[in-house]
Amino acid sequence: MEEHMENIDGKEVNVKTANGDDDEQMKPSTTMCPKEGETPQASNSDFSHPVYKEIALANGHINRMSKEELRLKLSQLKLDTRGVKDVMKKRLKSHYKKQKLTQSAADSGPADLFYDYICVVDFEATCEEDNPPDFLHEIIEFPMVLISTHTLEIVGTFQEYVKPELYPTLSDFCVKLTGITQDKVDAAKPFPAVLKRVVKWLEERELGTKYKYTFLTDGAWDMSKFLNIQCRISQIRYPRFARKWINIRKSYGNFYKVPRTQTKLSTMLDKLGLQYEGRPHSGLDDSRNIARVALRMLQDGCQLRVNEHLHDGQLVSVPSWAPMDGAPPPRWPGTRK
Ligand code: AMP
Ligand code: MG
């Protein structure tokens, strides 16, 4: 029997002894926190509860299903039948896992949600064809797409263009890539003024005060490179509220068990059976499409959580066992001394 079992994250193992995931071995200590799709109550156990054996058996069974069987089962359960085989498998496993954990935690209460809102950001920046690694990118578009993890919908969007100050003239390559024309950035405010409006927009939605939230990006560069460089150019501190974020490529790779080479936005959409909507490299359209991937992952039972962090200007990975915390309330970061 045991060779067909899996741990709750989908690895074929002896369920009694192994609970690792792709990023980090889970530490069996009090710092352990909910994994993707778990109830917080269940996460405090050592996985010896019988529900985990049931989940492992179901996972083993799902692993042996053909693509057609998976599609049929998903359809009977009125679940989405799109996507490649691995995506369908993960969806079905998540469904059973959620169902079984919910049943078993029926009286100990709700929800495996941590953030109320997730704010997707995808900056566009000045560029040249084959920019060197030390190219001083300046942000030219600041878009945000806000997802409610409760209603699983996009509940708000923000978009402002930004006037670059070091090199105000866009290259032809940049205009062609992003679709952002010179007149748009000429008419825009410089970065500090736009950041003030971003802070106001987040504050108006009571993020970080009434509601828990965090940022989500496609890759690590938006925060660790573009925002980091821009803050230096604009002589302002890096904002505390943007220090941690969810890198969706990592979350997607871990959740659907695919290598990082398959986590480009176009590939993620494709594997989920979705098509890109809008214009690639428009910051707002990119953000909307990233949000669509995030929503599908939430629907498939993934508990998206912060996995990257900027510490002293350096990009650091946040392990899956680190305590969950939401972003602090948005604040104007102040100028650099
Ligand atoms: P993206 O989110 O993929 O649209 O990229 C964000 C930013 O990265 C763009 O606004 C450009 O500044 C830069 N970038 C993306 N693709 C390229 C490329 N092929 N060549 C040079 N810069 C690029
Ligand atoms: Mg983009």
Image: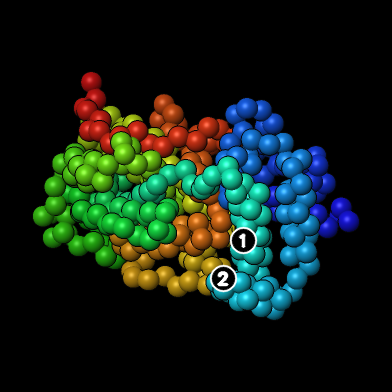
Quarter of the N terminus within the rendering: bottom right
Q: Is mark 2 within 8 Å of ligand 2?
A: no
Q: Can you tell which mark lies on residue 168? A: none
As shown in the figure, which amino acid type bears the numbered disc 2? Leu
Describe residue 242's horizontal placement relative to residue 159 as left or right: right
As shown in the figure, which amino acid type bears the numbered disc 1? His
Which is nearer the eye, 331 or 185? 331
Q: Residue furthest left?
A: 187
**Residue 262 visible in this rendered orientation of the protein:** yes
Q: Quadrant of residue 272?
A: bottom right
The residue tagged 1 is: 95
Rendering coords of residue 108 (x, y %): 58, 42
Which is nearer the eye, 226 or 149? 149
Q: Residue furthest front?
A: 107
Describe residue 330's horizontal placement relative to residue 150 as left or right: left
Describe residue 286's horizontal placement relative to residue 84 as left or right: left
The residue tagged 2 is: 79
Residue for point 66% across, 60% down: 96
Is the C-beta separation of discs 2 and 1 under 8 Å? yes
